[in-house]
Amino acid sequence: MMRLYDLLLRAYPPAFRDRFGEGMRHALASDLARARSRGRVAAGMFWLITIWQAASLGLSARRAERRQRPHKFSPIPISRGTSMRTFFSIDWRDALRSLRATPVITAAAVLSLALGIGANTALFTIFNSLLLKTLPVREPQQLALLDDGSWTYPIWEQVKARETMFDGVFAWSNFGIDLAPSGATDMVSGAFVSGRTFEVLGVAAQLGRTITPDDDVRGGGPSGPVAVISHGLWQKRYAGAGDVVGKPISVNRVKYSIVGVTPPEFFGTEVGRNVDVMIPFGTEPLLRPTALDARSTWWLEIFARLKSGQSVGDATTALRGVQPLIRAATLPQDWPESDKANYLKEPLTMVSAATGRSALRSRFEEPLNVIMAVVGLVLLIACANIASLLVARAVSRRHELSLRLALGASRWRISRQLVAESALMSIAGGALGLAFAYWGSRMLVRQLTTSATNVVFLDLHFDWRVLGFTALVALMTTTIFGLAPASGTMRIQPNEVLRERGRGVAGDARFGLRNVLVVIQVALSLALVVAAALFGRTLSGLTTRHLGFVPDPVLTISLSAGKTGVPKDQFGPLFDQVVDAVKAVPGVASVGASFTTPVGNAGWNTRVEVPGMPEPTPGAPARDGRYVPWVNTVTPDWFETYGMKLIDGRSIAATDRLGTPKVAVVNQTFATRFFPGQRAVGAHFKVDREASDIEIVGIVADAVYRSLRADMAPTIFFAQAQQEPGRDLMLSVRAAGGSPGALTRSIADAIGRVNPLIAMTFRPLSDQIGASLVQERLVATLSGFFGALALMLSGLGLYGVTSHAVSRQRAEIGIRMALGARPAGIVAMVLRRTSWLVGIGVIAGAALSFWGATYLKTLLYGVQPRDLMTFVGAGAVLIAVGLVAAWLPARRAAKVEPTTALRSS
Amino acid sequence: MQISEPLKPAVFHILLALADRESHGYAVMQAVREQSGGRVPMQTGSFYRHLSKLLDGGLVAEAARKRADDDPRRGSYYRLTPLGQKVLTSEKQRLTDLLAAMGGLKAIKKLQ
């Protein structure tokens, strides 16, 4: 943050800074701390005031300083030359004065600019943090990552044995950590790290020590299982206590001890995730059936620090040299021969890891691109609006400007002042936009976080890139909207001052320019309204989509018996007890257990063999979704809990247990796809690699399995009791009424009484469905907001252009009315003019949208990109806005008294 | 610069805050905020602008730093010059006279 002060202090003259710099920095820091303690609004106000004061007082201090210096040039401004000195000394003052003379236009322009620049900067801040910022570690550009994605632990051991090829290597694996010692889970983001991770990264502990190679020994080193926690967790959970080192911490119900705290800026190696607890790989066997020796479990990332002078390419070459040894030593023995051959051949590649890696990048790249395009268009519309306001100003200042020309001012000098005015507005708009972006980017990132276990964390502090981007955008806007009025001055004649004013009839060259600007605004706005409507319809289509089940009020509970100490063959009876206990809780209507819940995180699909099954389309992928059904395993009450209707046959029954013939309930799509034209109940099928036949005993109505966007897919429901019981299970509880969240406490108590070591995570189903739509909701909300903003801006633009034209035509209108024109005729005359502009704009906008909409295709659901109704509706909205914007000044014109109009001109 | 009566409220408050003790910039700002009950807005930028004018006008001067243990990051310490003292006293007198005149007016109104 200190860097922002320094930047602001630069607004003051150097002598002033030398004299007061220290004191000012101290005062700003103290005030900021005070403002922050009073909340976000106070902090925002602080920055606004500080930026404003730096701009205004810095300028006046510079001016005062200059006034004290003796003048080298003639003090008469008009005869001065055009040296840089005069450029900086005179024009700004005049520009400021003339902007103050028209406060409404200036405020409107600065505000629309601030919104435009702010939206762009907010988006860029996120881009910057996601894609451009380097990791906050020592010499991040020296970090490299073993491409691509995940590796097995045996491969890591092979690389580690050859770490002298580099300046150090380390491995990292993110995973969710439950901090609760018993009962309901308390999830935070965690990671396994190898012994030298912190040393190679160059991250020192802020408190205590980091993890060392001694700790990274199977089963824990001499200090036992140890953990390093983040600065954030230290502050949040331990209130920054100095004695946190040595305290115990429960990691997935296993006791670890805290040995250190990482510095505040360190968040791990994945951009978008803030890792709170880091533990050594060696302790992984304490937490779960170990994967340390598994040769086909891919779960960690391998990083290297390059030697100085070693390029990423050199590192790849070095690694390829030993690749055969690494591959051969880690070959998965049970793989088919062809896969083994591929495994040995696949080349190892290093890529730069200066900016870390990120799962968010790919997930949000497309929606962020679309929103970036949207805010870019909004900025263009804002620019057109401001240009149009400034042209209006310039036109009404013709008299003043021609007077100045007549008195001997050069054209160059006058246009320079107009450019200076635009530049001042850009600076003000940019500064205000920065404040808007600070708030906007944080709000946006909060929207991306969908649950406690999936907190999106991005470092959104402004750096030189963001400030540079804002400056560049402000500069670009100045050029775009500042040149229009300046170019107009080139045509002003000095003798115009002698002519009478006010008799002008439409036909002014700059009206032509304004008309073009308004047409552009209408066209761009139409494109934005079309996009907003398409995204809005996508979201509403998804939220109102027929689910096939009733989501409210259902509570889902994810159970894990992994740490209960109960032997594997007893998981079944244990979960039976849990289900019975939950059933007995007052307020619970029904309870179902399953492998996964609808719209859940887990999916399971399998190939099936049906006698006489239609062949999949030739050339279709082996796992074509239409022929590879989804699978779930459920208890008898599961269908009732979700309100899913049985269409034919029977449901899963309590008598379907291990040892009885395997049965399945399938959905309607399965029945019609695999048994077209026949009754599926009573039919048999086989699944992948299993010998036994499965009998279909019932058919249920179709329901969404995992994604709201997917079509209804064939789905098989097996009996939960006929499966090998696993250590994890999903419970779904339908509440008798009211909010399902209210049952959390009593259900947790009931399960705790069965076994206190069962880990459980609660989540209302409606929550989970909402979270699965975060991307669609974000895009729809933002495009809706900016669409409305664009409409407002073009409404303003049309209003301005019409009312200006009307005021220029006052005399003409007065004459017409004196000759007998009716008020309605005058209104029609004005509206006709505006309708032309809107009409051309709408047609151009429709063409633009028709071309652009296809790029949105992958983000849409249930609506075609070139949907006729959407286009017609958006056109109608724009025409309505245009008519209202034109009708107001038209009505005013029609009320003009002919005599007043003629007399005043 | 010209320092003329009546003084701007902010300038008056700065002089008042420096009347009985030398302080560093932020302490003066805080004193002004407290004295005026927050009615005189005092932000860093505007405070140092006023201060630079007062220094140039010879009403305020930089003081030698008093305590060795003080945090140097706070910047210089400032004190009132005899001229500043005089300006403050005369402004105080002017305000007192003004108040007295208002009291007199009230008294006259009551008589009527």
Image (cartoon, coloured by chain):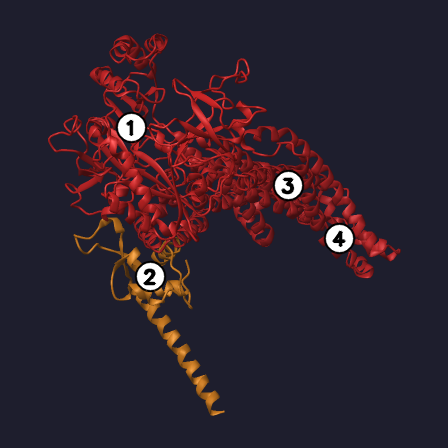
| Colour red belongs to chain | A
Quarter containing the N terminus of chain A: top left
The amino acid pointed to by label 4 is Ala
Provide the chain ID for the residue under circle 3: A
- From the image, tell me which residue sits under label 1: A173
- From the image, tell me which residue sits under label 3: A485
Q: Nearer the viewer, mark 3 or mark 1?
A: 1
Asked if disc 3 and disc 1 are in contact, CB closer than 8 Å, the reply is no
The amino acid pointed to by label 1 is Ser
Q: Nearer the viewer, mark 3 or mark 4?
A: 4
Q: Quadrant of residue A232?
A: top left
Provide the chain ID for the residue under circle 2: B
- From the image, tell me which residue sits under label 2: B59
Res A890 label: 4
**3 and 1 marks on the same chain:** yes
| Colour orange belongs to chain | B
Nearest to N terminus: mark 3 or mark 1: 1
In x, y percent, where is residue A153?
Answer: 25, 21
In x, y percent, where is residue B77?
Answer: 26, 55
Asked if disc 1 and disc 2 are in contact, CB closer than 8 Å, the reply is no
In x, y percent, where is residue A498?
Answer: 75, 49
- Label 2 Cα neighbours within 10 Å, binned few <14 / some 14-19 / many ≥20: many
Residue A491 visible = no
Provide the chain ID for the residue under circle 1: A
Quarter containing the C terminus of chain A: bottom right
**1 and 4 marks on the same chain:** yes
Measure the C-alpha gap from mark 3 to mark 4: 26 Å
Q: Quadrant of residue A574?
A: top left
In the image, is A500 to the left or to the right of A33?
Answer: right
**2 and 4 marks on the same chain:** no
